[in-house]
Amino acid sequence: MRSALAAVFVLTLAACAAGPAAAPTDHTDVPGAPRVATPFADNARDAAQRIVDAIATDSRAQARLRHLCDEIGPRLSGSEGLASAVEWTVATLRADGLDARQEFVAVPHWIRGRESATAAVVSATGGSAAPGSSRELRMLGLGNSVGTPPEGVEGEVVAVRDFDHLESIGAAVRGKIVLFTKAMPPYDAEKGAGYGETVVYRTQGASRAAKLGAVAVLVRSVTATSLSTPHTGSVTYAVDQPRIPAAALSIEDADWLARRVEDVVADGRSMRVRLRMEARFEPDAPSANVVADLRGSERPDEIVLIGAHLDSWDVGQGAHDDGANCMAVMEAMRTLQRLGLRPRRTIRAVLFVNEENGLRGAIGYATSQRENVAKHVVAIEADAGCYRPLGFTTPASDDPRVRRFRERMQDVMTLLAPLGADRLRDGGGGADIGLLGQGGVQLLGLDVEGSRYFDIHHTAADTFDKVAKEDIDRVAAVLAITAFAIADAPIRVDE
């Protein structure tokens, strides 16, 4: 591990240091902006080297992830697993010498229950067709979905390509089950995954179909590649529409079902599905964000936040989403603490709860910090899987403050170049820090090589064995270096 991480970092950083000094950052293209020299002192480079060496030789991130996944397990909001995870992370951070605490949040308590979906071709006279025309479908109910009656919901399936197609057929879906067949595009090395253009069918599909009279919806799992594994995720119901059951199918079953619908319509038969879901809500449950501070030496009231979310879905172990990044955040804080690195400003770790099906943790934190939002210099979120870090994304904006921030962040990128994590591109910040962004806080989202992330995203396959030790340690190093550099800068990088 040392040769793969620390040695490469030392050699590359030495080469950077031997080159010409960095030119002052020129902000003259921003109206009213001063010309500011590189704001990071030499000790930031020294700290970066020490951080990488310390993590390479003594990281606990992977061992802690193993405990989180194998001993605690899935951590859906309201579950015993999440409650155990909150208690364990607070105790672990305190044992590392950090000022850690729980900040109360009430979270939704959705329970999946038993569920199934069966498809069959039915002839015009009501009889069953050939044996190959019926099968059990591999499905997962969508988070926050309502359940079905005990006997289930049965209806003819109408396959639609997208929302425009749905609207074009209108009342033809009344009393039927709508299948959304929109496929997520393959991963692009420059643009990343096409998640945003397809996840809307999972979140909005139920209400869009219910408006036209559908009795249930099925969604092709939001992934480009999978092995007969359905992907769950939240559904968001419109307040002015009926709530109908919603479930995701594996991409193989969704494609098969769409083909069968096409085949049978021509000769007067129909494709019918019986969907059974015991999904229900219990009253909100007590939970808490986990917050830990490394107090600043000169400006402790100014905060650089690094965060990830501690909750997960109830299938799999929530290893990549988002347990490994939580452990990387904890390792970053542990490393800074044990090295005695005290930046000018406070570095705060926040492990949010209820990111998956409610964002109550994000809302709770933003609400508690309503009077202190301006004291947050930067908020950093890691929630795109724990793979090899490439750099950071920021929300696209023409705001002069954002442009100036991005320019100043180029200085941090030079510290991350030895780790191959010096890319800064448009792409947003993160769900849990979004409300802080609305309050004017500059946002950074960890950018990773996530070509395989959506293969397992929100599935039973998101397990400990999928996370590489080298990746989780690199993420921890990138978070620690970035947070320290920003927190220790002589100037606020957001001004």
Image (spheres, rainbow, N blue to C red):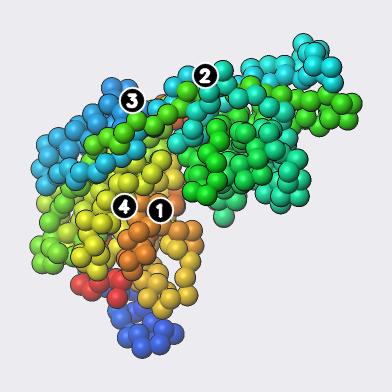
* Three-letter code for the amino acid on which mark 4 is drawn: Ile
Depth check: give the residue in front, 53 or 354: 354
Give the labeled residue for mark 1.
430
Give the labeled residue for mark 2.
150
Residue 179 percent across, percent down from the top left: 67, 35
Q: Answer with left or right where residue 36 lies relative to residue 221.
A: left
Disc 1 to disc 4: CB gap under 8 Å: no
The answer to whether 444 is drawn above or below residue 86 in the figure is below
Front tag of 1 and 4: 4
- The disc, 2 or 1, on the residue closer to the chain's N-terminal end is 2
Compute the Cα span from label 3 to label 2: 29 Å
Instruction: Count the numbered circles shown.
Output: 4
Q: Residue at x 16, y 51 (%)?
A: 293
Q: Quadrant of the N terminus?
A: top left
Depth check: give the residue in front, 69 or 360: 360
Q: Answer with left or right where residue 231 lies relative to residue 492.
A: right
Q: Residue at x 11, y 37 (%)?
A: 95
Compute the Cα span from label 2 to label 1: 38 Å
Give the labeled residue for mark 3.
73
